[in-house]
Image (spheres, rainbow, N blue to C red):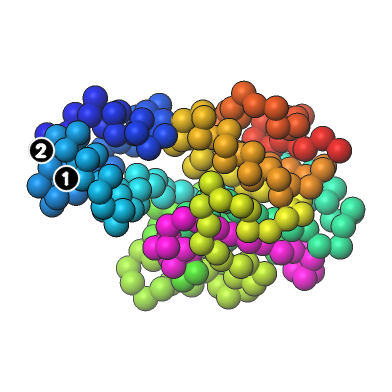
Amino acid sequence: MLTDSDFRVLLACYERSWQGYRKVRKGPMKRVRKHMEALGCNSVKQYLDTLAKDQAEEEVLLSILRITISRFFRDRKLWTSLADTVFPALLAQTDKVKIWSAGCSCGEEVYSLSILYHMRWSDCSRLAVIATDANGSCLERARKGIYQKSSLRELDSQLLSSCFIPSGRRGEYCILPLYRKYILWRHHDFFTAPPDRGFHVIFLRNNLLTYYNSQAQSVALGLILQSLLPGGYLITGSREVLPETPCNLVATKNCDMIYQMRE
């Protein structure tokens, strides 16, 4: 039996935050229990010892600990601010806006960005998006662009019918090819060098700043921000807080999820 205390020990060993996992812990804990049973481990100590000797099984655990829940246009205030303030300012300053979605999960927010841009501006050649995640299965789902109704509940019927078509399976919809353009999908881990440089916007929402501890956040954020241009924007989740580290970011007035890098 895996208790909350056991799970907290496990999270601490992998620089994860109990506070971040607390409300979503049931699913990961169930999968960890099954993994422990499959390995014949009767305690967390035995499980950790086994993982230390087998990198492949450790990768299984890391995959189990990734939370992939998301939905289109999550936090409407953010998308309104992006459309009304951030993107008009950037498009007035540069010919091409470079965006990195770090930890893109299954692509809901990347495609939300694409839909938003197409709704407001027609010249998509001015948009370049790199979407990355450490989970290969998530990236594959993102490339396919097929989603269940639960991921689309923020969309009204008109937007759903104009941007998606039924996938052929009940309750699933496939995003139209138009909204896939200018998105480059890549495998990437937060704790390695950024996939490129010179980004005007970095989406870092509901992943690193929620599920990792403050020390791990500071290390990864330091790497990530190396690729953000002066005057560029970092986008976080609605309940996320930046770690106490000198990162030269200031909160914007219009939205508390948007930070700007000092010039």
Asked if marks 2 and 1 touch (Cβ < 8 Å), the reply is yes
Query: Few, some or many C-alpha atoms within 10 Å of disc 1 (few <14, some 14-19, many ≥20)?
Result: many
Locate residue 66, reporting x and y percent. 39, 47
Q: Nearer the viewer, residue 168 or 261?
A: 261
Amino acid type, mark 1? Met
Q: Is residue 34 inside the magenta stretch?
A: no
Residue designated by label 2? 42
Residue that appears at 74% across and 64% down = 127
Q: Which kind of residue does numbered mark 2 sit on?
A: Asn
Numbered badge on residue 124: none
Upstream in sequence: badge 2 or badge 1? 1
Quarter of the image containing the C terminus? top right
Coordinates of residue 245 in the picture (x, y in percent): 65, 26
Residue for badge 1: 36
Residue that appears at 44% across and 67% down = 140
Circle 1: element type: helix
Stretch of the chain drawn in magenta: 121-142
> Compared with residue 33, is residue 100 higher up or lower down, i.e. above or below?
below
Task: Give the class, few, some or many, for how many residues have Cα within 10 Å of label 2's Cα (few <14, many ≥20).
Answer: few
**Residue 9 seen in the current view:** yes
Across and down, in percent, residue 65 comes to: 34, 44
Q: Residue at x 42, y 63 (%)?
A: 136
Could you tell me how many numbered marks the image carries?
2
Give me the residue at 14% from left, 50% from top: 39
Horizontal arrangement in the rendering, residue 94 relative to residue 238 (left or right): right
Whether residue 143 is situated above or below residue 39 in the rendered picture = below
